[in-house]
Image (cartoon, grey):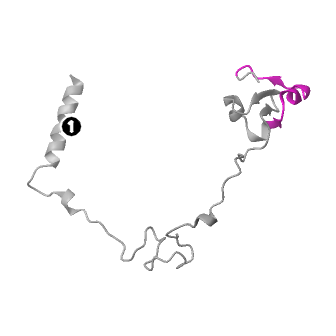
Amino acid sequence: MKRISILILALITLCACNTGGGNNSHADVSVCYPADNSVNGYRTSSGNSSAAAGSMPDEIPITSVKPGTGKSNKKSGSFVGNKKSHVFHKSSCASAKKTKDENKKYFSTRDEAVSAGYSPCGSCKP
């Protein structure tokens, strides 16, 4: 019953805003367009890509685009060890992602982590 009364009250309020008479504040909306061809201050009215310092170019030539290396910015190693708990994980394990950067130690192989005294994670089972 409470929900129905709140719904009816909301509908009455919405209908009161759309009445034809009275002061209709929605009709007083104005939109200001820039005088020149600028979009957030990046483009200039000349349309030239080198017109102003810091301006955004109209086109980016294909020669200036460089492909990525395919490697991530993370440190190398397929296994991540936790220096405090002495447990190592696969780099994709949620526990490895939660480990603070200063507590991480990277290993290339599973055997390297085991020989360093680290135990395997029970979740990801590296």
Highlighted range, magenta: 104-123
Is 114 located above or below residue 22 in the figure? above
Q: For residue 120, what is the image quadrant? A: top right
Residue 21 x/y as whole percent: 8, 54
Q: Residue furthest right?
A: 115
Q: Is residue 109 magenta?
A: yes
Residue 100 x/y as whole percent: 73, 38
Q: Which residue, given by chain and number where applicable, does mark 1 sit on?
A: 10
How crowded pointer 1 is (Cα within 10 Å; few <14, some 14-19, many 20+) is rated as few
Residue at point 18%, 35% (across, down)? 9
Is 52 located above or below residue 105 in the figure? below
Is 61 located above or below residue 9 in the figure? below
Q: Does the magenta stretch include residue 45?
A: no
Residue at point 83%, 35% (across, down)? 108
Is 96 located above or below residue 73 in the figure? above
Residue at point 77%, 24% (across, down)? 126
Residue at point 72%, 32% (across, down)? 96
Q: For residue 95, what is the image quadrant? A: top right
**Residue type pointed to by label 1:** Ala
Q: In what quadrant of the picture does the N terminus appear?
A: top left
Q: Residue furthest front?
A: 63
